[in-house]
Amino acid sequence: MKRKKSIRKKLTEMYSLLYSHFGWQNWWPAKTKFEVMVGAILTQNTSWKNVERAIKNLRVHNLINPFRLHSVSDKKCASLIKPAGYFNVKTKRLKNFVSFFLRRYNGSLKSLFAQDLKPLRHELLSVNGIGQETADSILLYAGEKAIFVVDAYTRRILMRHNLINENATYETIQNIFMKNLPRDVKLFNDFHAQIVRCGNVYCRRISRCEKCPLSNLK
C-alpha cells in the first residue's frame, strides 16, 4: 500500500510540474476525429512535424474521409503520405484500418465509439498494423475513452525517475497510470501530451536534465 501511495504522489507531482512549465497542451491537434485516427497511424516511427505534412497533403486532396481514402489508389495514397516515412507500409495500414471501419461501422464515428472500451480496443488490435499505442491513441484522443497512452517518451521518463525497469511491458507501464490516477479523459489526454512535450524538449536520448521541469522530482 505504501508503494502505491508513493507512486500516486510521484505521478501527481510529475503532472503538476509539467503543467506548470508547459501549460495545457490542447492535444491532439486535428480538425476531425477521423483525422486523429489517420494521424495516429501516420505518427508511427516518425515525428509529428512529418505527420503534419502528410496530413496537409491528404487535406488538399480531400482525403480525410474514410470513403474517399478507401477508394484512392495505394500509389496515390503513398505519394501523399510520403513525408511521414514508411509510406508503403503506412498506406497498407491506413487501408486496413479504413476497410475495418467501413465494413464494421459503415464509417460512423458515433457507432464506433458507442462501443465499450475493452471490446473496442480488442477490435482495433485485431486490425493488421494497429498496435497498442496506436489503438490507445485512437481510443483516448478520438474516442475520448479513459485509457492512458504509452510511448517511447513515457518509458524513458519513467525509467529515468525509477518508476519502472528496462524490462517493463506496455501493460505494466500503462497500469502504473491507470491504477494510480483518476480515470479522467482530460487528465490522461493532457498528461500524455505533457510527457511527449517533455520528451521532445528535455528527456531526449542525450538528456537535458539541468533545465527539465522534472529535475527536482523526488
Image (spheres, grey):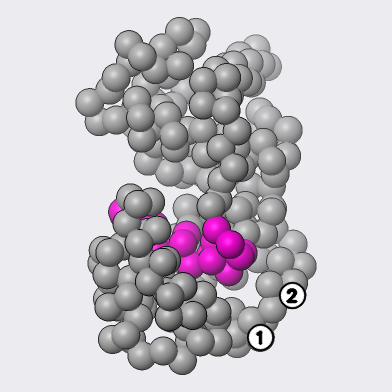
Q: Is residue 102 left or right of residue 95?
A: right
Q: Which residue is mark 1?
A: 106
Which quadrant of the structure image shows residue 179?
Answer: top right
Residue in view at x 60 percent, y 37 percent: 190
Asked if residue 99 lies left or right of residue 209, the reply is right
Classify residue 2 as left or right of residue 90. Answer: right
Classed neighbour count for the residue bearing mark 2: other residues with Cα under 10 Å, few (<14), some (14–19), many (≥20): few
What amino acid is at disc 1?
Asn
Residue 72 visible: yes
Q: Residue at x 55, y 87 (%)?
A: 67
The image position of residue 218, as x and y in percent, is 50, 8
Tag 2's secondary structure?
helix
SS label for mark 1: loop
Residue 111 bears which disc, if any? Answer: 2
User: In this rendering, is residue 62 above or below 194?
Assistant: below
Q: Quadrant of residue 166?
A: top left
Q: Please say whether residue 37 is one of the residues in the magenta stretch.
A: yes
Q: How many marks?
A: 2
Quadrant that contains the N terminus: top right
Nearer to the camera, 93 or 23:
23
Tell me the residue at 36%/90% (across/down): 73
* Residue drawn at the location 22% of the way across and 26% of the way down: 206
Picture layout, residue 209 above or below residue 200: above
Image coordinates of residue 102 in percent, x first then y, are 60, 85
Please determine whether, in this image, residue 61 is positioned above or below residue 40.
below
Tags 2 and 1 touching, CB below 8 Å = yes
Is residue 65 placed above or below 156 in the rendered structure?
A: below
First to last magenta residue range: 30-46
- Work out how far the residue at label 2 is from the one at label 1, CA to CA, in angstroms: 9 Å
Taking the view exactly as shown, the residue that stands out farthest to the front is 60
Amino acid type indicated by mark 2: Ser
